[in-house]
Image (spheres, rainbow, N blue to C red):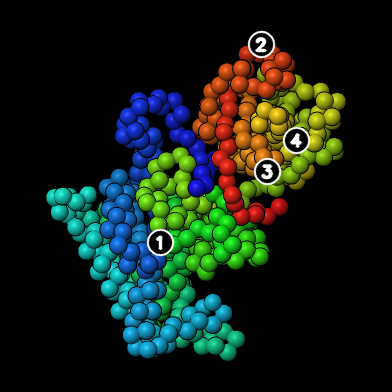
Amino acid sequence: MTTRPHRPRPDDDIQSTNDPFVDWVREATPYIHAHRGRTFVIAFGGEAVVDARFPELVHDIALLHGLGIRLVLVHGARPQIEQRLQGQGVELRYVNGLRVTDDRALACVKEAAGMVRVEIEALLSLGLANSPMAGVRIPVVSGNFVTARPLGVIDGVDYAHTGAVRRVDHRSLRLLLDQGMVALMPPLGYSPTGEVFNLSAADVARSAAVALGADKLIFLTESAESQQGARLAPNLLAREVDALLAGTQMLPDEIATCLRAGAEACRHGIRRVHLVERGEHGALLRELFTHDGHGTLISAEPYEDLRPARIDDVTGILELLRPMEERGVLVRRSRERLETEIDCFHIAERDGLVTACAALYPYPHDDMAELACLAVHQDYRGGRRGERLLEHIEGLTRARGIGRLFVLTTQTAHWFQERGFQPSGLEALPMEKRALYNFQRNSKVFIKTLPDCRSLPKSP
Ligand SMILES: CC(C)(COP(=O)(O)OP(=O)(O)OC[C@H]1O[C@@H](n2cnc3c(N)ncnc32)[C@H](O)[C@@H]1OP(=O)(O)O)[C@@H](O)C(=O)NCCC(=O)NCCS
């Protein structure tokens, strides 16, 4: 099981009551507030619909609706299509990973999409007194929101009725969502010539999310592992997704398709794309309402590359740190000390300006490392650089096999607490560090236990 290292913990001041139910509700409350009124596009394959536990997933989706989340559901229908074709003694044809939809296949696609739609609508209409949907009324709407074009002829292969999304009618969708409806989108699109096209659900989901400016795009996947059995990392940048797709790890087609669509969505402004393994009990709820999350989060590129500092960065780092040292936020460091410790520093740089830095001092005998001197240039604050640098330092710490990161701070306690650090006493620090503690400065100690995660290799 992987946990997400950086997921902000909205309220670490919550005291445990030893009542798991009360604790859980309280832990979830900040997320409930944060998600209300947001638009989520949730995509799942036709496999989810044939699963005996599909009603549970629909109940969870109904709960999201009940909590005021604006929902667009995008479903696939592959097993249903394949089953129909097999019934006729034919198979769906793939060329270079793309399916070819001939007339017979298109008829099956239409039938399958219609059937899946009815199943989902029926489950969302359930209102029996003894079910989690008791008394709930969820209006569901489906329609010709997607305009599609044919894929055409590629390398001499005519893909016939297989299409690609051309545009999504986000205005109509938005009006319906405003009225509290759940939009249900099949993997189908229509062309101005009146034709119907078979689309990939991931393409529909990505296009709908981008057109709507959705707050989240969530892919419920069948698996989260490469064919070598490695799990996806809990956090990936769009650029890291590209490297992963171009790399040697064999990823199941479904995962590769979702990763590709997710990275693409990020590049078009979707801030958070989640890949959540559908089969894990309550995975969607855990992903959305707990601080650990369970899936993989793809986010947009950082603004600058992070890299180890070099000796010629010392002047830039000093310029960055000076104003914070003068205000007493950071401990003053001399040029000599910085030069000696430069190998511990990591920086973000933009056009020759050091925009952020942090230092990592390992204490391997104590299974601890210190994060120090985390600083973001005044003009570049609030853009997640601090968080990104923290994630980077956490990754470096884990890569050294060290499980705990500590920080001493006077004015930034909450920032660290919101990112999973717990207040601690001096006695928890490595002996060497304790001996150097400046009682006059009276810094507070915070420690974060880093999750151990077996992840796919990230790009350098
Ligand atoms: C703390 C710091 C590194 C954050 O960098 P950043 O790139 O702006 O951080 P992020 O974009 O990831 O996070 C911004 C959030 O942190 C909050 N934040 C900034 N400083 C904070 C502080 N001292 N305490 C609590 N929260 C703080 C912001 O209000 C913002 O929250 P919001 O999104 O809810 O408005 C940066 O403010 C900084 O350099 N501070 C001075 C140096 C320092 O205190 N370093 C830590 C000591 S080791």
Report the residue marked by disc 3.
399
Q: Of the residues tagged 3 and 1, which is closer to the observer?
A: 3
Residue 385 seen from this side:
no
- Residue plotted at (58% across, 37% down): 450
Label 1 SS: strand
Looking at the rendered structure, the kind of residue marked 1 is Ala
* Res 43 label: 1
Residues marked 1 and 2 touching at CB (< 8 Å)? no
- At x 42% / y 41%, what residue is drawn? 290
**Residue 185 percent location from the top left of the image:** 35, 66
Residue on which disc 4 sits: 345
At a point 54% along the width and 49% down the height, the residue shown is 234
In the rendered image, which quarter is residue 347 located in? Answer: top right
Q: CA distance from mark 3 to mark 1?
A: 33 Å
| Disc nearest the viewer among 2 and 3 | 3
What amino acid is labelled 2 in the image?
Phe
How far apart marks 4 and 1 lie (CA) works out to: 41 Å
Give the label on residue 439, or none: 2
Is mark 3 in CB contact (under 8 Å) with mark 1?
A: no
Question: In terms of image quadrants, where is residue 209?
Answer: bottom left
Q: Which residue is located at x 19 percent, y 51 percent?
A: 131
Determine crowd level at label 1: few under 14, some 14-19, many 20+ residues with C-alpha closer than 10 A: many
